[in-house]
Image (cartoon, rainbow, N blue to C red):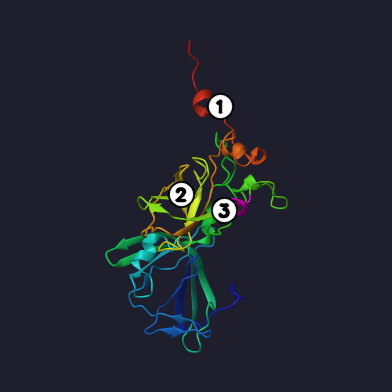
């Protein structure tokens, strides 16, 4: 009895892959002499220069990783898309079907992956595909730390749900008693630009530092649709500085949404901004290793 729910015809194999960005863009590839039309009408582009490394796996929980590379623009992936982060956290699907009859999308699934690091060499890109099983190899357990180790809110501006073992500042899922991201999102528009990392919305009236450790996501302009960026600092006059520069030019009038952040201190933002000490796991009074491992001195 086969372990897979469906197996493609082994005598007429057709290998295909699909990349789905979090913003909705989909890129389809086929290892075949010409483009392939699936039974559902999707077209998988036959790019002779799109080259994946060998797929391999083991019976244990060791995650499989493979790379793929190709020339920019040949299959729709551009240099700007890769550098700007459009493919960050994109999902990848590799599957096998048959060329003899109408090819079927995902007929025999081979891999489901998350795109990792991207590399550029002249006009060639290289993408790392990490197996979803890689999450099972991560270190688990609680840490004792002076700052709270939980991530603020249960999701990000990009709509990513944060793992429940990292986002406990909102209390139990059945009865959340902490901050909800929707209550803290603000919107606005740029009124002046200093650089790709520093811009101002003069209509903002929050106190200095209010948005520190928060995030901003562009809703209009050239950067619309890209992943959110962490805020480094904010001033009372509405000046925002981000850790990373925007990839495309920020223009006056570009609209954004942002939320405030948390400094993860028990007597800091957790208390003054959110009144959420009940869910804070900061332990600033715990003796450090340097202290308890000291030898006695006279």
| Numbered disc 2: secondary structure | loop
Label 3, on which residue? 185
Residue furthest left as drawn: 122
The earlier-in-sequence mark between 3 and 2 is 3
Q: Main secondary structure of the magenta part?
A: helix
Q: Which residue is drawn at 53% across and 24% down?
A: 292
| Residue 202: numbered disc | 2
Q: Where is residue 12 in the image (x, y as percent from the top left)?
A: 46, 85
Q: Which residue lies furthest to the right in this view?
A: 175
Of residues 209 and 75, which is closer to you in this image?
209
Residue 179 in the image: x percent, y percent?
63, 47
Mark toward the viewer: 1 or 2: 2
Element on which disc 1 rests: loop
Query: Looking at the image, is mark 1 or mark 3 nearer the viewer?
Result: 3
The Cα atoms of the two marked residues, 1 and 2, are separated by 45 Å
Q: Is residue 23 above or below residue 288?
A: below
| Residue at 53% from the left image edge and 82% from the top image edge | 104
- Of labels 1 and 3, earlier in sequence is 3
* Range of residues picked out in magenta: 180-184
Where residue 64 sits in the image (x, y, percent)?
47, 62
Measure how far apart labels 1 and 3 are at the Cα level: 37 Å
The residue labelled by disc 1 is 287
Give above or below for 1 relative to 285. Answer: below
Q: Position of residue 61 (x, y in %)?
A: 54, 58
Between tags 3 and 2, which lies in front?
2
Mark 3–mark 2 CB contact (< 8 Å): no
Disc 1 packing (10 Å; few <14; some 14–19; many ≥20): few
- What mark, if any, has residue 198 been given in the picture? none
């Amino acid at each position: 009895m086969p372990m897979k729910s469906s197996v493609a015809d082994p005598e007429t194999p057709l290998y295909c892959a699909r990349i789905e960005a979090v913003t909705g863009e989909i890129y389809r590839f086929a290892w075949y002499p010409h483009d392939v039309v699936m039974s559902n009408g999707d077209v998988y582009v036959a790019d002779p220069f799109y080259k994946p490394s060998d797929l391999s796996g083991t019976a244990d929980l060791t995650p499989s990783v493979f790379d793929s590379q190709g020339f920019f623009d040949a299959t729709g992936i551009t240099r700007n898309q890769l550098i700007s982060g459009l493919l960050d956290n994109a999902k990848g699907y590799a599957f096998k079907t048959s060329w003899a009859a109408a090819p079927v999308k995902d007929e025999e699934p081979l891999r489901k992956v998350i795109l990792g690091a991207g590399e550029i060499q002249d006009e060639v890109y290289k993408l790392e595909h990490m197996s979803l099983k890689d999450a099972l190899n991560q270190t688990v357990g609680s840490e004792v730390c002076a700052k709270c180790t939980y991530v603020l809110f249960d999701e990000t501006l990009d709509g990513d749900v944060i793992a429940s073992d990292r986002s406990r500042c909102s209390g139990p899922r059945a009865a959340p008693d902490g901050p909800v991201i929707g209550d803290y999102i603000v919107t606005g528009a740029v009124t002046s630009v200093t650089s790709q990392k520093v811009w101002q919305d003069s209509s903002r009236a929050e106190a200095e530092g209010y948005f520190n450790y928060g995030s901003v996501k562009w809703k209009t302009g050239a950067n619309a649709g890209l992943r959110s960026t962490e805020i480094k600092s904010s001033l009372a006059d509405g000046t925002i500085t981000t850790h990373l520069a925007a990839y495309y030019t920020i223009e006056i009038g570009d609209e954004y949404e942002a939320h405030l952040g948390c400094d993860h201190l028990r007597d800091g933002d957790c208390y003054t901004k959110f009144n959420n000490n009940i869910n804070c796991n900061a332990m600033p009074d715990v003796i450090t290793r340097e202290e308890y491992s000291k030898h006695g001195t006279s």
